[in-house]
């Protein structure tokens, strides 16, 4: 079988390259392709960040958070930790040839300050004001000390003031013809089947870029993905493949993968559930403990992820990646609640009068009203969907009537923002320390609509917020460790969520057409292709076409794929 890379009509309007090298990547599933390259919007296309809009700095998580300078060349915190100074890179141009300066940085942060709904990284809780010290110097005065603020500030996208200053509605602006500083800024042949994103003609590091175009094909769900990756269509992906050796790696020696450890997948309770009686049950610690003890975690991993993962040990939900941050005594204290024990689960439910009052086989609310719950997951996320189905079956075994519902991802995110669900599954973003998990998962500030789903269980505890505020300003490692221990204690003792299992970071790569891949033998940086995974910029610049691929393109031949 052969695969013609150009068979999808994506080249109806061809880029200005002869025999271009094209990297096909799948960072995210989309139900539809739109010309949305506004990096402030959650609905933007998944090749927007990093590839079009380069960050100030990338912190390399596999190299002890080493700063990899991009649009900035240096940063320095004030001694009192209440200010930070960035030196910008000279000579950088936007893709339309205009110079990049401090004015662009000030303008971009002003958007997030003026429109809180676009402040997806929580800039406003830290930045008091921004000063332009020179054309290539900017200074941020902070509202409160923060030793780690650089990690947050560099996540905000930097957009060109000269293009964006005429925009009248940033919240709905789709930026269909983007102007960026990144390596791939030119959009070609966008259609419902995908698009090409080709080289920035004035990229500041063009000598380090060895690929002409990125190809983003529309992939709607996991089944679609698995069928097509087996054909050799994709080069760089990051999705779940069941029994990955049989369904992927065995099909070709070029089909490779690496599964670094990741964060946990947890079951979330909605503490603002619309039904007040359901809400009252969720507020009972005994109910949450019972749910946790009804779960057979290893069985869930064996079936839902084909063994790719480890059962969660920490009731706090902290990833196994940060085992050195855990308090062993605290972990053991709550281990029984993370262990399958349906008898004790039933006893706990009886204690709070969640019993079968009409002898129909299902437990009812204390009022006698039927208790029927749903678990929400994004449609097409096969591992999530199967996990939810298994969880519902396990909960039904202890008499809880639970079913599953699947929605498209946009609806999934919206329903979190409007507290329109009962139970749901989520994973969590990674960070250089456990702080990012605890902050994103439990900081009440992140329960506002503009933020992602992670804290939208709507559980609030001022003590947690206070500890989270203290961590960035703690002057010693010992103090930071103590804060993580206390956060672990509170979240575990309350069982705010039910951690299920620690997953892996899904990453697949095809060596047929490109070399230079990051992997366990070449761990230069995180290999993830996912949206807003900053190190993917370092990765794409490290890739080079293989000699075979170059010869094939020069000959104008199709790419053979082994089956």
Image (cartoon, rainbow, N blue to C red):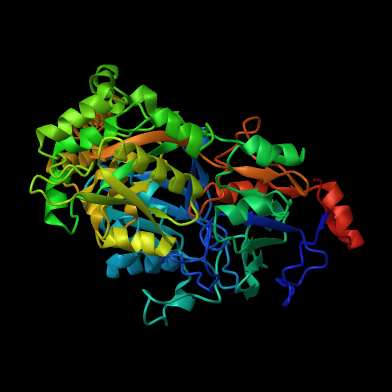
- Horizontal side, residue 181 vs residue 329: left or right: right
Quadrant of image for the N terminus: bottom right
Q: Which residue is farthest front?
A: 359
Task: Name the residue located 50 percent from the left edge and 48 percent from the top edge.
Answer: 382
Please state the horizontal and vertical placement of residue 426, each as a whole percent of the image. 37, 47
Residue 354 appearing in the image = yes
The residue nearer to you, when weighing 361 against 275, is 361
The residue nearer to you, when weighing 546 against 524, is 546
User: On screen, 456 above or below 257?
Assistant: below
Task: Name the residue located 45 percent from the left edge and 44 percent from the top edge.
Answer: 386
Image mark count? 0
Quadrant of image for the C terminus: top right
- Horizontal side, residue 497 vs residue 310: left or right: left
Task: Name the residue located 74 percent from the left edge and 43 percent from the top edge.
Answer: 511
Please state the horizontal and vertical placement of residue 336, each as a whole percent of the image. 26, 22
- Horizontal side, residue 442 vs residue 43: left or right: left
Please state the horizontal and vertical placement of residue 46, each as a whole percent of the image. 53, 60
User: On screen, 145 above or below 343?
Assistant: below
The residue nearer to you, when weighing 180 against 417, is 417
Task: Name the residue located 63 percent from the left edge and 55 percent from the top edge.
Answer: 25
Residue 491 appearing in the image = no
């Amino acid at each position: 079988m052969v695969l013609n890379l150009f068979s999808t009509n994506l080249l109806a309007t061809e880029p200005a390259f002869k025999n271009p090298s094209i990297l096909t990547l799948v960072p995210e599933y989309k139900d539809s392709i739109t010309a949305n390259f506004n990096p402030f919007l959650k609905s933007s296309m998944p090749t927007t960040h990093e590839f079009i809009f380069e960050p100030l700095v990338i912190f390399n998580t596999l190299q002890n958070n080493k700063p990899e300078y991009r649009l900035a060349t240096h940063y320095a915190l004030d001694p009192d930790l209440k200010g930070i100074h960035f030196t910008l890179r000279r000579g950088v141009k936007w893709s339309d040839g205009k110079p990049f300066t401090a004015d662009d940085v000030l303008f971009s942060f002003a958007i997030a300050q003026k429109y809180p709904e676009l402040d997806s990284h929580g800039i406003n809780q830290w930045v008091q004001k921004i000063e332009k010290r020179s054309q290539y110097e900017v200074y941020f005065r902070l509202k409160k000390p923060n030793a780690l603020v650089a990690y947050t500030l560099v996540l905000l996208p930097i957009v060109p003031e000269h293009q964006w200053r005429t925009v009248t509605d940033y919240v709905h602006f789709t930026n269909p013809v983007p102007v960026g500083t990144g390596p791939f800024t030119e959009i070609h042949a966008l259609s419902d089947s995908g698009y090409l994103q080709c080289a920035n003609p004035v990229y500041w590091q063009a000598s380090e870029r060895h690929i002409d175009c990125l190809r983003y094909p529309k992939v709607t769900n996991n089944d679609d993905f698995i069928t097509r990756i087996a054909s050799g269509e994709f080069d760089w992906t990051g999705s779940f493949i069941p029994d990955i050796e049989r369904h992927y790696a065995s099909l070709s020696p070029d089909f490779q993968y690496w599964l670094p450890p990741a964060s946990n997948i947890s079951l979330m309770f909605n503490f603002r559930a619309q039904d007040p009686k359901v809400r009252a049950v969720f507020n009972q610690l005994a109910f949450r403990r019972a749910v946790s003890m009804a779960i057979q975690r290893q069985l869930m991993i064996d079936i839902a992820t084909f063994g790719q993962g480890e059962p969660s040990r920490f009731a706090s939900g902290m990833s196994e990646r940060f085992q050195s941050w855990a308090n062993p005594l605290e972990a053991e204290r709550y281990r029984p609640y993370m262990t399958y024990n349906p008898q004790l689960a039933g006893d706990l439910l009886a204690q709070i009068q969640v019993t079968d009052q009409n002898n129909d086989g299902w437990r009812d609310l204390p009022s006698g009203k039927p208790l029927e719950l749903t678990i929400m997951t994004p449609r097409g996320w096969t591992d999530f969907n199967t996990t939810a189905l298994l969880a519902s079956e396990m909960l039904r075994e202890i008499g809880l009537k639970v079913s599953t519902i699947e929605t498209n991802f946009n609806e999934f995110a919206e329903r979190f923002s409007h507290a329109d669900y009962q139970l749901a599954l989520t994973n969590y973003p990674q960070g250089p320390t456990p702080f990012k998990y605890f902050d994103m998962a439990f900081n009440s500030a992140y329960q506002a609509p503009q933020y992602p789903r992670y804290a939208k269980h709507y559980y609030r505890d001022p003590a947690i917020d206070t500890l989270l505020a203290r961590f960035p300003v703690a002057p010693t490692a010992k103090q930071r460790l103590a804060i993580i221990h206390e956060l672990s204690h509170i979240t575990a003792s309350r069982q705010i969520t039910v951690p299920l299992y620690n997953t892996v970071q899904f990453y697949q790569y095809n060596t047929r057409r490109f070399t230079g891949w990051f992997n366990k033998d070449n761990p230069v940086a995180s290999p993830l292709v996912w949206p807003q995974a900053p190190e993917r910029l370092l990765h794409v610049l490290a890739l080079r076409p293989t000699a075979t691929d170059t010869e094939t393109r020069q000959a104008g031949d199709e790419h053979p794929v082994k089956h």
